Image (spheres, rainbow, N blue to C red):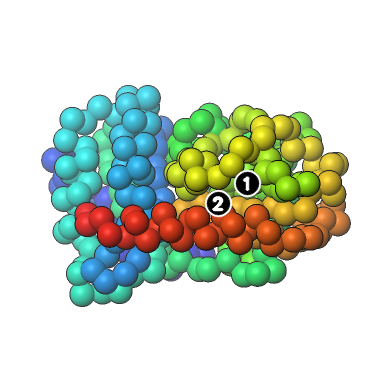
Amino acid sequence: MATYLLKKSYQLKNLKEIMFKDLWGDHGVFTTMWILSKPPKIIFFKDHIDNLIKSSKVYGINNKNLKKNILTLLKFNLSNKKRYNHLLRIALTKKVISISLRKRFKPKINLNLKLIKLKRSKPEYKNLKYKKILSYLSKLDNSKFDIGLVDNGNLLETGTSNILLSKNNKLYSPVNNFYRGITLKTLEKKLNKIYKRNIYVNNLDQYEEIILLGSGKGIASVANINSVKWKRKSFKFFNLILKKFNSEMNKSLKIKL
């Protein structure tokens, strides 16, 4: 289980603090952001918040002061005297806003992907229907393992990240039925063409690399998928994508909250 540095909930209408609710399984949305440095900086903060607000409207969460209220709560709860390397989660329903901080663990070089038959509920949105995924992730060391979500024989994403795969000097992405995260959206603009195709599990041996992109993982290279005897054959695209990610991250860290 994750150890939390901070867990707080507030009434959305007036920001009055209430007993903490993680909101998992409720009708609402969330975002997870990487917060680091001293004073605290949040990677791709504007993109995350803009996307959260956009998604919240789809779920009937209409609060005209939402961005201002999020900033108020963050400034109240974050310390300029503390050095962070944490994951910051903001979750919303029509009545409650919850914020939490947990330590970020850097993914290991021997990262293993465990395949499970599962697809996100309404995967185009980062919604709170996430308990099934959490039930798998909670049993794993998330620095060494992630879960690969498989539907109809297609690998869609992981429990924490988007995926890109390489073959014959080209990058490939699943076609649909997955959540396009902020890290992927940011780096798509910096990479050459990414080809869309169904990523069939029984054809994974064709691919040389499987690369994870997410707010928590950052950029990670999968070493093994033991269930299908897949092993990493290269770091070429991982190194390229990591370099571009670090460049964009450094730009982001110059922006104050």
| Relative side of 195 to 231, left or right | left
Residue located beneath label 1 in the image: 163
Q: Circle 2 — which element?
A: strand
| Relative side of 109 to 131, left or right | right
Residue located beneath label 2 in the image: 213
Specify whether residue 153 is in view. yes
Specify whether residue 159 is in view. no
Distance between the Cα atoms at labels 1 and 2?
6 Å
Three-letter residue code for mark 1: Ile
Looking at the picture, does residue 163 appear above or below residue 59?
below
The location of residue 19, given as percent across then percent down, is 27, 53
The location of residue 152, given as percent across then percent down, is 76, 31
Q: Residue at x 62, y 70 (%)?
A: 108
State the residue in front, 232 or 82: 232
| Relative side of 73 to 53, left or right | left
Three-letter residue code for mark 2: Leu
State the residue in front, 153 or 257: 257
Q: Residues within 10 Å of mark 1 (few under 14, many from 20)?
A: many
Q: Residues within 10 Å of mark 2 (few under 14, many from 20)?
A: many
Looking at the image, is mark 1 or mark 2 earlier in the sequence? 1
Looking at the picture, does residue 85 appear above or below residue 9?
below
Specify the quadrant that holds the C terminus: bottom left
Q: Looking at the rendering, which quadrant does residue 222 occupy?
A: bottom right
State the residue in front, 134 or 217: 217
> Are the residues flagged by discs 1 and 2 in contact, CB closer than 8 Å?
yes
